[in-house]
Amino acid sequence: MPRPVRVPAPRPGGREWLNGPLVWAIDETHQPMYLLPRDCPRILVWPTAMTTAADREQWFAGTSCRMRAFIEAAWRDRLASATLHRYEFADAAFADLADAGMWVSRTPVAPIAHTEVRDLVGELRAQDVDLVVLDSLVPLRELWSTSLQTSGIRLRNAAGWAAWPTVAPVAFR
């Protein structure tokens, strides 16, 4: 069923409707961004064709993964014990937002499949995502100044995040 977002976000002009009642979906490529407990603050990064060798070396040295996910240590136990319900939908009812694999529907949508994911860490690993647990996400604010694709979700829940000046908008290139 379409539902408004729990915490409305600032939206560009003409896109305020994204805070209204919608069914949200994510494509398979970007699915790892949501393989974490709902309110868990996280930053995910991945290289693109525009990523410099220096950024790749700094942020992906020693790993061949396609994506890295950073969370705070305070969320480790919740991640280990969480169960995620993954629904699959036919794409006909959804409109592509052309933003990080996100799709929305303004009308109710019946799932065509449902699975429970009980091992989120294992699922991230299966999707070639390197999970990095840190004491704080605050030092990672610089990621938005790199040539990597960077996504920050639920950062308002990160310890100390609100105390720092706002960085560039969390947008996809």
Image: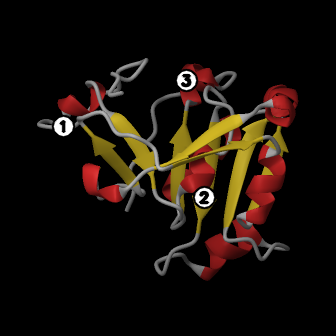
Residue 109 horizontal/vertical position (percent): 34, 39
| Residue neighbourhood size for the residue with mark 3, other residues' Cα within 10 Å, grouped as few (<14), some (14–19), many (≥20) | few
Amino acid bearing label 1: Arg
Residue 45 is marked as 2
Amino acid bearing label 3: Arg
Q: Which residue is mark 3?
A: 156
SS label for mark 3 = helix
**Rendered view: 6 above or below 102:** above
Looking at the picture, tell me which residue is in the foreground, 59 or 151.
151
Which of discs 1 and 2 lies nearer the camera? The answer is: 1
Residue 122 is marked as none
Alpha carbon of mark 3 to alpha carbon of mark 2: how far?
18 Å
Residue 24 in sight in this render: yes
Residue 15 is marked as 1
Q: Is residue 72 left or right of residue 141?
A: right
Circles 3 and 2, Cβ within 8 Å, touching? The answer is no
Quadrant location of the C terminus in the rendered image: bottom left
Which of discs 1 and 3 lies nearer the camera? The answer is: 1
Residue in the picture at 42% in, 56% down: 100
Alpha carbon of mark 1 to alpha carbon of mark 3: how far?
21 Å
SS label for mark 1 = loop
Toward which corner of the image does residue 11 lie, by quadrant? Answer: top left
Residue 57 horizontal/vertical position (percent): 72, 75
Q: Earlier in the sequence, mark 1 or mark 3?
A: 1
